[in-house]
Amino acid sequence: MSKTLVTYVSQTGNTKFIAEAIYAAIEGEKSIKSAENVLDEDLKEYSLIFIGFPVHSHSISFKAESLIKRIPKKKKIALFSTHGSLTGSHLSRKALEYAAVVGSHTQIIGTFSCRGKVSMHALDVLSRSPEHKAWAEMAASAHSHPDDNDIADARSFAHWIQTLFAQP
Ligand SMILES: Cc1cc2nc3c(=O)[nH]c(=O)nc-3n(C[C@H](O)[C@H](O)[C@H](O)COP(=O)(O)O)c2cc1C
């Protein structure tokens, strides 16, 4: 049976919440670790790795980028993100697209994303800047996410990735 690792970067808890839903849905031997606790041996040992991160500045943080770069070549991975932007919008996809480029040495077998409430502090700061005001107004509607539907989708994503992983 394969060994699956779920690892994540999370500043305000949304991505951690989704990571826990994915972890709960995974069958077989599994572990969940925040990015800071992941050793290079872990990255070698697990045959399937889920990697989650929040979207920051329409991209991924240095921490998330460093983690993806450490994944061994050809490892099967699945990427997931949480974001304040509207689901399916170009802005919500950009970070995953960038992460896929950073992880192009791996085998990315799937991606998932959902909205996550933006911290009041970030919304407050961004809404005071003319450049970011409109985005902050749009992103405020993420306040109820991740919700039960997001959790159900994250669980389905976990099952789907395990199904794809099992195929030759
Ligand atoms: C400093 C900061 C910058 C952010 N920038 C973006 C962004 O550019 N695009 C976006 O969709 N969400 C952005 N967000 C919202 C987060 O991606 C969202 O709230 C995410 O769910 C946070 O995940 P976490 O709780 O795991 O840290 C930002 C949040 C913060 C705090």
Image: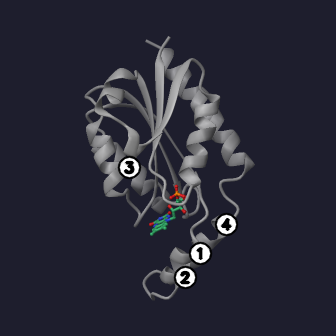
Q: Amino acid at mark 2?
A: Asp
Q: Is residue 45 left or right of residue 31?
A: left
Residue 152 vs 132, above or below: the answer is: above
Neighbor class of circle 3 (other Cα within 10 Å; few <14, some 14-19, many 20+) is few
Q: Look at the numbered discs 3 and 4 and tell me whether their residues touch, using CB distance below 8 Å.
A: no
Picture disc at residue 120: 1
| Residue tagged 2 | 124
Image label count: 4
State the separation of the CA atoms marked 2 and 1: 6 Å
Neighbor class of circle 1 (other Cα within 10 Å; few <14, some 14-19, many 20+) is few
Residue at 61% from the left image edge and 47% from the top image edge = 17
Query: In terms of secondary structure, where does tag 2 sit?
Result: helix
Q: Is residue 23 left or right of residue 110?
A: right
Q: Look at the numbered discs 1 and 4 and tell me whether their residues touch, using CB distance below 8 Å.
A: no
Q: Looking at the image, tell me whether mark 3 or mark 2 is earlier in sequence order.
A: 3
Whether label 4 lies within 8 Å of ligand 1 gets the answer no
State the separation of the CA atoms marked 1 and 4: 10 Å
| Residue tagged 3 | 97
Point out residue 67 in the picture as x, y percentages from the top left corner.
32, 43
